[in-house]
Image (tube, rainbow, N blue to C red):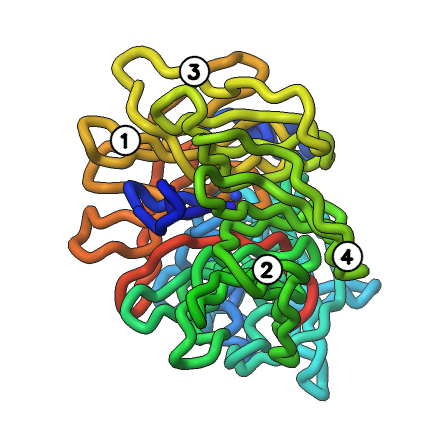
Amino acid sequence: MRARWLGLGLLLISAPARAQDSTTLDRVRVGIVYQPGVRPGIVILPAQGLDSVRAIIARDLDYSDRFEVIPLPDGGASSAPVTGGSAAGTPSLNYALLSKLNAVLALELVRSANGSMVTVRLHDLVTSRVRNERGMSLDPSGLGDSRLGIHAVADEVVRWATGAPGIAATRMLYQERGSGRIYRIDSDGYGPTAVTPPGQHALSPAWSPTGDKFAFVAFGEGAASIVVQTIGTGTRVTIPTTSTGMNITPAFSPDGKSLAFARIGEQATSIYTVNVADLCCVERIAGGRFAHNLSPVYSPDARRMAFASDRTGSPQIYAMAADGTDQELLVPGGFGADGPAYAPDWSPDGSAIVFHREVSRSPQVFVYQLSARRVKQITSSGRNEDPSWAPDGRHIVYVSDRAGRPQLHIIDLETARVRQLAAPGVARLPAWSRALSAPR
């Protein structure tokens, strides 16, 4: 979904190129009124044998930007506000005491006797009742892939409290420039892991919708091939007709059955699609003499694509039907933001396009709201590029050098909060997965 701008049949990179809900805190729930811009306070209760789990969940809820995570006062563990069991077996909490901490929600975790299950309860401190309860299987060690099960707990709490999807049980792919390898990293920055082999230069990772595969560009023998790799086994399949020539910027269709990519010719760069399920039927859908068209990305309903093209001079963001018809300029310039634009990514709900555009020769991230036909610049400090949407439609990951070397940064569009993921080396071309329901 993102790419490098390529000219005259060469990898001339003038800029890197390549993923909404409305405010959710205005929902009225039993006992709690969510006001726009106000984050409800939540306290995470002490839980025997689950200290690491509590810490991970607390960080996840903080990073969701939907809650104010309130720490318990000193001695909270010893003065546990659980006062005993009710007739139904559900613990009775000291709701009045917890409410004095300015919390409106309390999260309780109870580990099963064998340690493999955790009962998750969300308490409403306003109505003094258990609002949601569910038993969830997880490994409390918090190591390796077991973290996804813990992240899933945090996402369930987000869903219970706001009705919106969470981002904790997700991962990102990115390229580490020094090694040229693709890495995978958890949404909270844990465990950067190389997923492509050493010695192979790779670019432009793109997740499949299910998160069990990813596509990327593999360079070798004077060619750039599109490869699809299975996460769990590492099995790799090269897409037909891409083993020769320069093929770049792959992107999966929403159903995972098709893949769009760009191919560099002697005088132009054209966009193709291929049936990934059957490994057949490569079809050229967009091109033009002396024009470079690349970075295709499907809309969530699979009916349209956005892409970058320099057909009228400076590269800009265009759109077309998924079969290549009805091509049009999608994002107009103006208001001083007329530089070349690259790396479009369609929001999960289809309402917006994120991309980067050069402003005074420095790339900055922009969001284009389709219905309002409005462009908004969301970064300004340093060089910021290669944006990708989170599955909740309110967070975006991108690469920024604002802290020195280019690193992954995440911005929350509602609060403008920015946090950095401490990836090793120099990060490029991130891609954010959809929710991962199980370790992969």
Mark 4 crowdedness (10 Å alpha carbons): few <14, some 14-19, many ≥20: some
Q: Quadrant of the C terminus?
A: bottom right
Circle 4 residue: 280
Q: Outermost residue toward the right? A: 88
Q: Amino acid at mark 1?
A: Glu
Q: Under tag 1, what secondary structure? A: strand
Residue 126 visible in the current orientation:
no
Q: Under tag 4, what secondary structure? A: strand
Residue 155 is situated, as x and y percent measured from the top left of the image, at: 61, 54
Residue 380's quadrant in the figure? top left
Q: Is residue 410 left or right of residue 25?
A: left
Residue depicted at x 52% and y 54%: 247
Q: Is label 4 or label 3 in front?
A: 4
Residue depicted at x 44% and y 75%: 194
Q: Amino acid at mark 4?
A: Cys
Q: Is label 1 or label 2 in front?
A: 2
Q: Is label 2 or label 3 in front?
A: 2
Mark found first going from the N terminus, 3 or 1: 3
Mark found first going from the N terminus, 2 or 4: 2
Mark 2 crowdedness (10 Å alpha carbons): few <14, some 14-19, many ≥20: some
Circle 2 residue: 242
Q: Does the CB distance between marks 4 and 1 fall below 8 Å?
A: no
Q: Does the CB distance between marks 2 and 3 fall below 8 Å?
A: no
Circle 3 residue: 332
Circle 1 residue: 358
Q: What separation in Å lies between label 4 and label 1 (alpha carbons)?
A: 37 Å
Residue 9 is situated, as x and y percent measured from the top left of the image, at: 40, 46
